Image (spheres, rainbow, N blue to C red):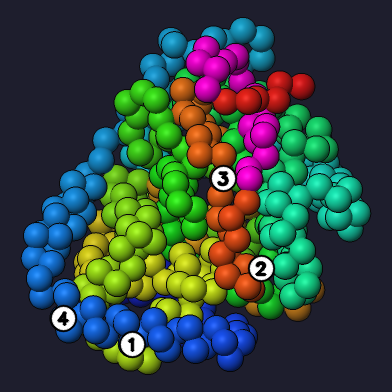
Amino acid sequence: MANKGSTLSEMLKGIGTLEDSADFTISWFQRLHIYLAIIGFVIYRLLITPWKVRKKRKFFSDLDALKNLPLRLPQPDEINEEGESNFLKQGELDFFKKNGFLVPFSVVSEGEAVKLKGLALDEYDKSFHGISFLGNKVRDIGIRHGDWPIEDAGAYQALSPPSFRELLRKPKISHRLASLLGNEVICWRSQFFHKMPGTGPTAWHQNATFRETGKYAKLQPALDADPAIVQLNAWVALTDAARENGCLLLLPGSFSDARISYLYEYMQTNRYFYLSQLPLSLPHLYFMAKIGFYGSIFAKSALVFFTAVEILGEDFFENFEVLDVEMKAGECLIFSALNMHASYPNITKIDCRFSFLGRCTTTHVKVSPSGKDRFPSAEGMVEFELPEVSSFQIYGGDSYGYNKIMRN
């Protein structure tokens, strides 16, 4: 656990700058779009922002309400413990309530992890048999611009090869998730992450209802639920994950403060007002507009993080400490998606970091009720229809019937 200097200085080590996140090529037309947007923003800031006193007051009031959030978990006796049991004991539950994650645990052998990585890459090499769960238009733009990595092509692909559904259903994972989410657990989205040598860092971010770049939240609880427990990540290392090849970083306990997630969502529908709360700097404004219009999801996360530091202040992070999460192939990390997390760059020459992620929730949560999503591409935002069946059962049944769930 890092404990040198301020928490923010530790968080920034190896994460890069806003300018680094804006280091991608755009066309002259896109550049013109940015310049026109900057002119519009300057006019907004000079003529309209001074009249937004009430909106500003509500903005900061809403932010204050997102501090010191609770984390309520089901009691252990609510869990069905038939058969092999890997349900959490009270001490482990208390640890999660405090930190928002579970200590990494072994779920498959190193050999099995290697086979799963090979399966994923083989499916990717076969273009996942022509199936794109992000829509054909997103795929075609990515291929046309030479930017269709497994992180995008592999979204939801655990719906195809059963090996990855079976991985999340192993009692070592499913019982732990049930201890935290309750008797009915689904994986609503799966992903692969292939951090190759030279790949840059992932900026600090958090997600509750997981809106990303869409118009609507993808997760909509039908019952009262603490934001920290709406979604849990089950992150399985299929290779060793070390600091040098880009392991994860966590800010344990930061699930209790959901302001970063709120700012991510707020900025998308209140772009000019949000930016008007920052110190005015035209060079930075160009980088921010470039990322806002044409950056990847990861670049947009960086944008929110760096602007949030300006709005919330550096001392926002001082109640937390940075944790490097180094893992062995075959280990799993379960953590609240609302716990701030990031990853180092891969500074090695030949060592890849490969992982599989299941984003998990419970059946009273409506998954993507709008049925649509938007995805950032090299040609701007693309709206597409989400897969009709995007979720699969991990544990228990489905008492609510809100979602179309694959059970095999």
What is the crowding at mark 3: few (fewer than 14 residues within 10 Å), some, or many (at least 20)? some
- First of labels 4, 1 by sequence position: 1
**Circle 1 sits on which residue?**
39
Position above or below: 108 against 339: above
Mark 4 secondary-structure assignment: helix
The image quadrant where one finds the C terminus is: top right
Residue sitting at x 31%, y 63%:
270
* Cα gap from disc 4 to disc 3, whole angstroms: 36 Å
**Amino acid on which the number 3 mark rests in the picture:** Lys
Residue sitting at x 45%, y 72%:
292
* Cα gap from disc 1 to disc 3, whole angstroms: 32 Å
Residue 39, percent from left and from top: 33, 87
Label 4 close to label 1 by CB (< 8 Å):
no
Q: Look at the image and tell me whether residue 101 can be seen.
A: no
Position above or below: 10 against 408: below
Tell me the magenta residue range.
Answer: 385-402
Mark sitting on residue 230: none
What is the crowding at mark 4: few (fewer than 14 residues within 10 Å), some, or many (at least 20)? few
Mark 3 secondary-structure assignment: strand
Mark sitting on residue 372: 3
Mark 2 secondary-structure assignment: loop
What is the crowding at mark 1: few (fewer than 14 residues within 10 Å), some, or many (at least 20)? few
**Circle 4 sits on which residue?**
47
Q: Quadrant of residue 248?
A: bottom right
Image depth: mark 3 or mark 2 in front? 3
Position above or below: 388 against 401: below
Label 2 close to label 4 by CB (< 8 Å):
no
**Circle 2 sits on which residue?**
245
Mark 1 secondary-structure assignment: helix
**Amino acid on which the number 1 mark rests in the picture:** Ile
**Amino acid on which the number 4 mark rests in the picture:** Leu
What is the crowding at mark 2: few (fewer than 14 residues within 10 Å), some, or many (at least 20)? many
